[in-house]
Amino acid sequence: MGLGFMIGVFGVLILSHAAYSTIQYRGLLKIMEEEFSGPPMNVVLELLLGFFFCIWAALTVPGNFLSIHPESEENRLDYLKLMLFFIHTSLAERRHTLEKDSVGY
Amino acid sequence: MAGHSDSSSSEKKSGEAMTDVPTFSAENLQNNMKVIYYSRTFMSITGGVIAGIFGFTGFVGFIFYFLVMTITSIGLIAKAKFSVHSYFDSWNRIILDGLMGGLMSFVLFWTFAYDIVHIF
């Protein structure tokens, strides 16, 4: 997570630099009395790089996905505890039913 | 003999009932939804800033947002190792969840970045 966070910070810094470069470029266009049609190619590459760094951070920093199936390896202990509880309850119910039947006879 | 077959049929019925009802860990599902929410929110903000820097206006900006969200969805599916049903109960969770909420964040940062870069 530490490395992902640093990559995210680096991505944000790259985007900030791209924004600053675009502001400077617009200032230059104003002096030359030209219209803004889009940022220069180096800024576009910077934006792409910042985007990829940010998407890497977005996918790694928030944490990992956890399996929702109770029988999966990481949930195995909880699954076994649950199964033990069901078996215990089922046996207790059967014993209760048998005792009731024997009392009835 | 009849009692034995009755008990085995009732065991089968209860077994069938158990397999018919899908069970999953709600806590883990909630954790996974939280991960998707954080990822989408951050990418919406990043996409908004990039759209503002590029100078997108109107419809083009929204097209860009859906492009960013599509790339994010592909990334999330890859993170789930392409077996979505191990981590979520439906494909809609990973494809559609958080889309409209992210749109608000995108528009906010799109407007903010556009103003800073192109107006002020």
Image (spheres, coloured by chain):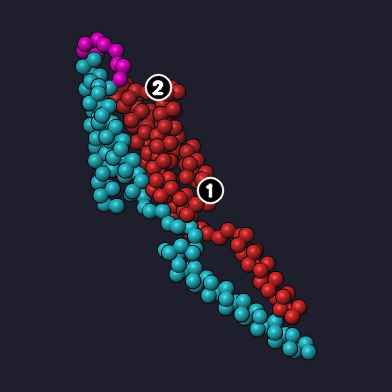
Chain colours: A cyan, B red
Residue at 43 percent across and 64 percent down: it is A73
Tell me the residue at 50%/52% (across/down).
Answer: B85
- Return the mark for residue B60: none
Q: To which chain does the residue with label 1 belong?
A: B
Residue at screen point 55% across, 74% down: A85
- Image quadrant holding the C terminus of chain A, namely bottom right
Which residue lies under the disc numbered 1? Answer: B90
- Residue B1: quadrant of the picture: bottom right
Residue B44 position (above or below residue B83): above
In this view, the residue in front, B42 or B14, is B14
Q: Is residue B29 above or below residue B9?
A: above
Q: Where is residue B26 in the image (x, y as percent from the top left)?
A: 51, 58
Prevalent SS, magenta region: loop
In the image, which disc is placed on residue B57? Answer: 2
- Residue A73, compared with residue B118, is above or below; it is below
Amino acid residing under circle 2: Thr
In-image side of B55 versus A31 (left or right):
right
How dense is the environment of label 2, judged by Cα within 10 Å: few (below 14), some, or many (20 and up)? few
Q: Where is residue A58 in the image (x, y as percent from the top left)?
A: 35, 44
Amino acid type shown at disc 1: Ser
Give the structural element (helix, strand or loop) at label 1: loop
Q: Give the range drawn in magenta.
A: A30-38
